[in-house]
Image (cartoon, grey):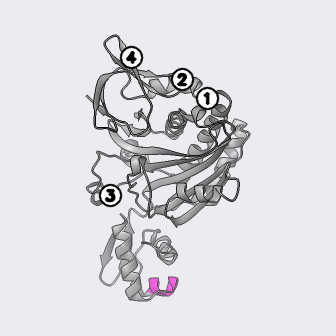
Amino acid sequence: MLTPLGFSLLRHLSDGSFHSGEDLAATVGLTRARVSQVLKDAEAAGLALERVKGLGYRLLEAPRFLDRHIVQDRVDVLTSERGLSTPVQVEIVDQVDSTSSELMRRSQRKDIHGTALASEWQTAGRGRRGRTWTAVVGGSLTFSLGWTFEQGAGFLAGLSLAVGVAVLRALEAEGFTGVALKWPNDIIHRHLKLGGILIELNGDALGPSTTVIGIGLNVRLPDAIRKDITAPVTDLTKVLGKKGEVDRNLLLARLLTELAAVLDQYANDGFAPFAAEWQHRHAYQGKPVRLLLPDGAVVHGKVAGVDASGALVLADGPRRARFLSGEISLRRA
């Protein structure tokens, strides 16, 4: 686990230059032994270090850490340009158990509508179906956004799909191509998982509802971390290729702005206005797939699309069947 002093140490090393253990210890107020331990923790968290006798330590591919002022300023500019009605307030922390868990806890005592929380490191990041979300310090983008709707859970059934549309719009605006959606809430590139969406809901059946929209994106996954992930994955650095470096601050600002625009529209019109765009962006539209159901059953068919509520419509000859996300997983046939 990386401590606040540990993050101070990493920020000092983020210039990419060599720093001696003695200088690092004096700068951040740690012993040299503690500096050595923190750097081992950093390596375990996915950061690559180089050690050279007589020179000290330096970070390889030193990350550019998230900066709240940069993100907030950019969000404000984009929000003004788009004429959006809900301002998004950005908060960035070094470490938290889960950005979604933290926002949900806050929702019990105050309004979190329009509050965005991003973290460099999550100790208990969560994905769908209770899975852990593997993140890399400086190499991931993990954040959550609180939003309140006047309607209840039924109206919000297609929300994760609409959020997927917002994520792809943002990625394309920042120069990423070939990214697609996988029902119900995965972001993929060439069938490799790039990120995911997790919606948590608290409220009355008829509303109002407080939602926490959690998003995780792989920005740069070192090979050592990639080997520990069982699912086939990729990252935004590979998607971008030689076109340049991924600026997480600008990308986060774009994502939050697109989310605010989509959520405002969803509050008025539901999922229906996004259905056609979602189908166009679905990597498996019109293709044969198999669905793994919670009881272990497997359903085969061709993806006919999604309906106005966000349910997947599967065709098996002339028959049509609807499936809501829940605990269902989609696989290529």
Magenta region, mostly helix, strand or loop?
helix
**Residue matched to label 2:** 308
Q: Quadrant of residue 125?
A: bottom left
Point out the tag, 4 or 3, that comes first from the N-terminus. Answer: 3
The answer to whether residue 313 is above or below residue 32 is above
For the point 55% across and 36% down, the residue is: 159
Tell me the amino acid under the disc marked 4.
Arg
Q: CA distance from mark 2 to mark 1?
A: 8 Å
Q: CA distance from mark 4 to mark 2?
A: 15 Å
* Residue 215 magenta: no
Outermost residue toward the top in this view: 318
Q: Secondary structure at mark 3?
A: loop
Query: Which of the pair 103/173 is nearer the observer?
Result: 103
Are the residues at dot 1 and dot 4 in contact (C-beta closer than 8 Å)?
A: no
**Residue matched to label 3:** 222
- The span picked out in magenta is 23-29
**Residue matched to label 1:** 270
